[in-house]
Image (tube, grey):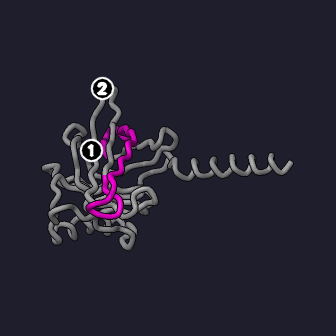
């Protein structure tokens, strides 16, 4: 009997986790998204300069996010970083995404480990596609990225303002160090 209770509890816990991580597709965006994103121009490698650490990527150094548009319209993503320092072991995550809102192309979905899906909002992208700010609808996760490994303090603060103006949890955003900073 106890074995069945434990199995039911485990299934319920996994189900609750999946519901929490999945996001609500019917939920209206609660912040201003980029007006329009040219998906092809957005592809390529971005250097992560600020992010909200998760248990998977806490203490990330030299973090990059690379997007590749596949023939089926899906977006293969490769997130790489060194764990714990410049001499840390390289870690790689490969979520797969797709454009959810095809009118603006600013709202994506990312599938992690083939199990759960999470919303991914492009809040800002510069006209020359050299800077971007990404967020989650709950305003608890965010990323500041550029096409260069170097980002001055003034530009970093300006990009942080994009999050602050949308009421993101700024105390959780951490600066990512890159070799040569």
Residue drawn 33% across and 37% down? 76
Observer-nearest of 19 and 7: 7
Residue at (19% x, 41% y) in the render: 41
Numbered tag placed on residue 29 in the rendering:
none
Q: Quadrant of residue 43?
A: top left
Q: Secondary structure at mark 1?
A: strand
Where residue 50 sits: x, y (%)? 29, 63
Q: Nearer the viewer, mark 1 or mark 2?
A: 1
Determine whether label 1 and label 2 are within 8 Å by CB. Answer: no
| Residue furthest out toward the top | 71
Q: Which residues are magenta?
A: 81-106
Query: Could you say where residue 111 lies in the image, as x and y percent from the top left?
Result: 44, 41
Question: Horizontal placement of 53 versus 46: left or right?
Answer: right
According to the picture, the residue beneath numbered tag 1 turns out to be 66
Q: Give the total number of marks visible in the rendering.
A: 2
Q: Which residue is mark 2?
A: 71
> Which of the two labelled residues, at mark 1 and mark 2, occupies the earlier sequence position?
1
Is residue 89 on the magenta stretch?
yes
């Amino acid at each position: 009997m106890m074995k069945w209770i434990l199995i039911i509890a485990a299934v319920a816990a996994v189900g609750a986790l999946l519901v929490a991580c999945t996001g609500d597709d019917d939920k209206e965006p609660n912040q201003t998204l980029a007006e329009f994103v040219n998906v092809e121009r957005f592809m390529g490698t971005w250097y992560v300069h600020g992010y909200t650490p998760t248990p998977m990527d806490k203490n990330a150094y030299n973090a990059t996010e690379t997007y590749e548009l596949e023939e089926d319209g899906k977006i293969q993503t490769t997130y790489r970083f060194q764990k714990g320092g410049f001499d840390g072991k390289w870690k790689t995550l490969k979520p797969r995404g797709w454009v959810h809102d095809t009118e603006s192309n600013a709202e994506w979905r990312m599938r992690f480990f083939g199990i759960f899906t999470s919303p991914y909002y492009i809040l800002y992208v510069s006209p020359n596609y050299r800077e971007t700010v990404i967020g989650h609808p709950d305003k608890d996760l965010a990323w500041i990225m550029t096409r260069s490994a170097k980002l001055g303090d003034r530009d970093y603060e300006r990009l942080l303002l994009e999050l602050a103006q949308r009421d993101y949890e700024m105390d959780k955003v951490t600066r990512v160090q890159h070799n040569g900073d």
